[in-house]
Each structure stands twice: as C-alpha cells, then as structure tokens.
Amino acid sequence: MQPTAPELEILKLLWHSQPQTARELHDEVEHILGWSYSSTRKTLERMGDKGFVSMKSSGNKKIYFAEIDKVKTLAAFAQDFAKRIFEIDGPLPVAMFTDSRLINDSEIADLEKLLHDLDKGVEQGSTEDKQGK
C-alpha cells in the first residue's frame, strides 16, 4: 500500500528529521496542506494504523517515527508515476534523482537497484499476463 500525497509529505518530514511531535509535524505541513491541527493528528493516527509511522508517548506529547523505508517507498512512487503518467515501460534513469534533496548519494545506488527490480517485476507480470491469455 502506498501512502497518499499528504501522508507522503509527513513521511518526508520524518525521513529528514525524526522523531517529531504531532505539533512539529503540523507546523511544517500546515502551509502545504492547509490543515487544522486535528486533521494532522487524525492523519498520523491513520498512518499508524497502516504501519507507516509508530508513536511513543513522552510525558504529555506523542512522538512519531517513520516505519516504512524511504528508498523503497520513493522507488515505488517513481515507478508508478512513470508507468501511469508517462507510459514508460523500461527502467527509469537514476540520473533524474541526483539533485534530490530527499535522498543522499549512498541511497541513489539502493534506489537504482530497487527501480531495476521493480521494472523486472513488471516485465514478469506482463509476460505472465500474455501467457495466461
């Protein structure tokens, strides 16, 4: 299951700096999403139910941690976007991610491997679909 666009915004904040409180996360996404604090808290609760984040209590504050892998999540989003929007069937060029502020140089190699693996999985599924028909 992929995160929704708002969930991805929260995950990006956590991947950049975690843990964070609900208030800290809200203060960052409020201008992007135009949400109330209660909407941010409810989204964090749903993300916890989905296994995207975990929460620990510290006094009267709830502190959140990202639980899904950043590179795997981004690779799945990139592959899905390329296929659905641009109808790209081959592997994506990893060079398109080199200027990203979200991933570092060491994660680029992991991303390249995941994109290649995802592409191979799509090819296998297409081959199986053709053989099954």
Image (cartoon, helix red, strand yellow):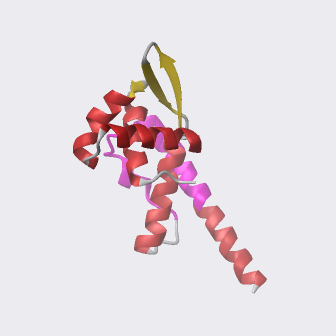
Q: Residue at x 66, y 75 (%)?
A: 126
Q: Nearer the viewer, residue 122 or 27?
A: 27
Q: Residue at x 44, y 66 (%)?
A: 82
**Residue 105 located within the stretch drawn in magenta:** yes
> Among all residues in the image, which is located at the extreme bottom?
133
> Among all residues in the image, which is located at the extreme left?
31
| Secondary structure predominantly adopted by residues drawn in magenta | helix
Relative image position of residue 25 (x, y in whole percent): 34, 33
* Residue 116 sits in quarter: bottom right
Q: Is residue 118 above or below residue 112?
A: below
| Residue 115 in sight from this viewpoint | yes
Magenta-highlighted residues: 91-118
| Residue 103 in sight from this viewpoint | no
Q: In this view, does 40 lie above or below 125?
A: above
Q: Which of 101 and 27 is in front in this view?
A: 27
Q: Residue at x 59, y 58 (%)?
A: 118
**Residue 121 located within the stretch drawn in magenta:** no
Relative image position of residue 110 (x, y in whole percent): 53, 43
Q: Is residue 26 above or below residue 60?
A: below
Q: Is residue 60 above or below residue 31?
A: above
Query: Which image quadrant: the C terminus?
Result: bottom right
